[in-house]
Amino acid sequence: MSASSRSLADAIRAFDAQQLAVLLRARPDLTQPRPLDLSELIERLSARASTLRALDRLDAWHLLVAQAVAAWEGGGDPVDDKQLAAAMGLPDDVAAVDRALDGLRQLGLAWGSPVHLTQAARAAFGEHPGGLAAVSPTPLAPATIDEALRAVGEAGRAVLDRLVWGPPTGTVQRADRAVTRESAESTMDLLLAWGLLRPIGPDQVLLPREVALRLRGGRLVRQPVPTQVPAWQAPTSATGASLPASLVDRAAIGSAQELTSHVVAVLDDIAARTPRALATGGVPKREMGTFTRLVDDARLAEFVIGITRGAGLFTTRGGLLMPTTGLDDFLDLDAFARWLLVRDAWRSLTWWPADLDAAGRAPAEEMTGSSASSRAASQRAAGQRPTGQPEPGAHGDAPTHPGLPTSAALREAAWDELVAATRGTAVVADSLAERLSWRHPAWLGVDWPGVARQLVREAEWLGLMAFGRTTGLLDATRSTPDPGFTAYGDRFVLQSDLTAVAPAPLDHDTAALIGVMANRESHGAAATYRFTPASLERALDAGWSVQDISEWLTTHNESGADAGLPAPLTSLLDDVARQHGKVRVMTLGAVVQLDDPATEASLLADPRAEDLGLIALAPGVLGAAAEPAELVAFLRQRGLAPVAQSSQGVQITTPPSRRAPAPARPVAPPPVDADALAAALLRRESTGLSPEQIVQALTRAYRDDLWVGVDWADDNGATHSHTMRVLSMGSGVVNLVRRAAGRLSLPVTRIIAVDIPASADAPSDAGKAALHERGCSAGLNPPASSSDRAM
């Protein structure tokens, strides 16, 4: 940026392509929609809303320097870097101040030398930046201030100390009363008489700027902040320090696969039961207890539910929790791809633990607005606690004051910190909290230690950390090879204690089938299943025969098909099979068939028989008004083992689980190539196409069959940009095709600019003459051989 710039516009126009690209990357809101030229870009970055977004992205050091410049400019003097560094309490670190000023210039928040904040940036710090009033009409001399301070004594100094760091205004009854040094009867009278407080209304006083600076010792800020992000702290425990990176990464992959197995377990349970949801769409507390038993940890269960919903794998439909169609696609993925989907969902996850929300220490789910940023910046600059921010240690409802980030923003910030750290870096919550608070000082009201503890916990569940250190999974992307996730298998070891142990994660079909025959006992990627009479009855109820069960278990036995089943398992299966099916249920209203007259009599005598409409139809045959499923449940409660059948005698199995449509996910705007946009803006600034030049550019694009950038205005005057190719031209109208967006016909007069790629060869002099002959501002006639060409 040129030091001789006379305005922000001059400064931005002096940017080279690299500087302009840096600006566009640092302030992405300037690229949506794409600016047509530098004038539009300058207008946008000067706007209040864009400026506040840029200030919100500043780290603590750059924000403090910006505040100090705003406070300095409030005195009317040009900014001197050495004096500014001294006023910030850093007289020996002028270089750091200079670097920060250069950074503000690069972001379009300041310009020139001596530096000037933009009008919008200065206004963001409020009426009293740095807690300092504007220059007094008749400033007091330093000697006069010292004499006045001695005159008002300690009592007067105590009053001034309440205003010295801002805000500089206070309320005093009859502040505009006439008082002299001789007639002063109170401390307030003395302060007014000596001019240490100046009345600005009937009941309001102001601490003059020169008095505040004298009391501060010339300081513009109360406390300096580190000029660089704090370093990672050394861990208090040496756990993991001596472990090789390969072992840490293997542990991380184990945690990652365990998390995805929990996701599948929860989804399978939801698919099987479709439990009811709260009216708000949330998960009832009773259901959370069920999910907690599945994953064996209450906090982890909340996280799994949150991230599973965030990934669009289940939703609420008709008052029920239901898997979405995305579940089937998820189950088709390999282990690594499943984890990538879960990790990506975590980065944009809007869920936050309910207990932290209730304690008033967690972030709100609303995006910070520009008005919030303005108020937060001005209150921070004045040394105040932002509106709505609780007193330290206060509890109550979750805070709703402006300045709180979203949960997704917090997770993305933590992701950035972990990715930037060297692999194997020890990460403790306190250190992460310190770094995040330095990176994002505009995020007010966040309990950083509590937030950091939750983020570290989630990073460990995801495998981004293991043994308190960062892992290689932080480098994993969809284009990188599988880092070593264990492939899903279909084998398990059958043991004589009626258990089956899976040495590797089971594929979904195998896990689902053995889950019908046995109860899962362990949690995580690898699993242990136990066969019980109830679990084997469950398999028989599902339509499996004894032979089917034996053959399937033998096929999937890790010991091989020749090993056979363990004797205890064979005996248990035979015992259950002998008892199974003695009672059969067929649909009528429903019909129950029994072989035992005593059982029939006891059923009819049961108090619930009347509610079920249970009656004797014939010896050994009962009829009921209830549905078969209701009858089956009743009979099982009586200790029987009924079999549900259709009216044709076909055994009824569990129907497939229902699926809800996956919820629509927000579509992010396509990324903007900052380098290409910067080059196009500078090229357009230097050329400034006339109507005739626009026609010539379109003719050349047609002749050479080029994809070109076209900016045009629609019927409402709104401007648009798109990459297009010219299909035909004539009668003042150009027919174009937009890349991936179809055809468009535009009057030439609506076209603002045509951007031909720099890689396209420049036309020869003869070509230029030919183009000039063909083109005219009123319309274009295509070459005689042309027609409406397809792509």
Image (cartoon, rainbow, N blue to C red):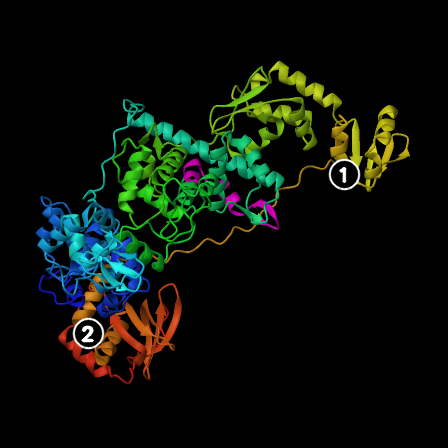
Q: Is residue 557 above or below residue 430?
A: above
Name the image quarter holding the C terminus.
Answer: bottom left
Q: Give the secondary structure at mark 2.
A: loop
Label at residue 28: none
The picture places residue 399, in percent across and down from the top left corner, at: 42, 48
- Relative horizontal placement of residue 47, taking residue 575 as reference (left or right): left
Residue pointed to by mark 2: 688
Q: CA distance from mark 1 to mark 2?
A: 80 Å
- The magenta stretch is 317-339
Q: Is residue 636 above or below residue 311?
A: above
- Going from the N terminus, do you reach mark 1 or mark 2 first? 1
From the viewer's side, name the closer residue of 641 and 45.
45
* Residue 31 visible: no
Measuring 36% from the left and 48% from the top, which residue is drawn there? 409
From the viewer's side, name the closer residue of 644 and 277.
277
The image quadrant that residue 671 belongs to is bottom left
* Residue 316 visible: yes
The picture places residue 584, in percent across and down from the top left corner, at: 79, 32
Amino acid at pointer 1: Pro
- Relative horizontal placement of residue 567, taking residue 444 as reference (left or right): right
Measuring 48% from the left and 29% from the top, which residue is drawn there? 524
Measuring 71% from the left and 19% from the top, which residue is drawn there? 575
Measuring 9% from the left and 53% from the top, which residue is drawn there? 143
Residue pointed to by mark 1: 628
Q: Give the secondary structure at mark 1.
A: helix
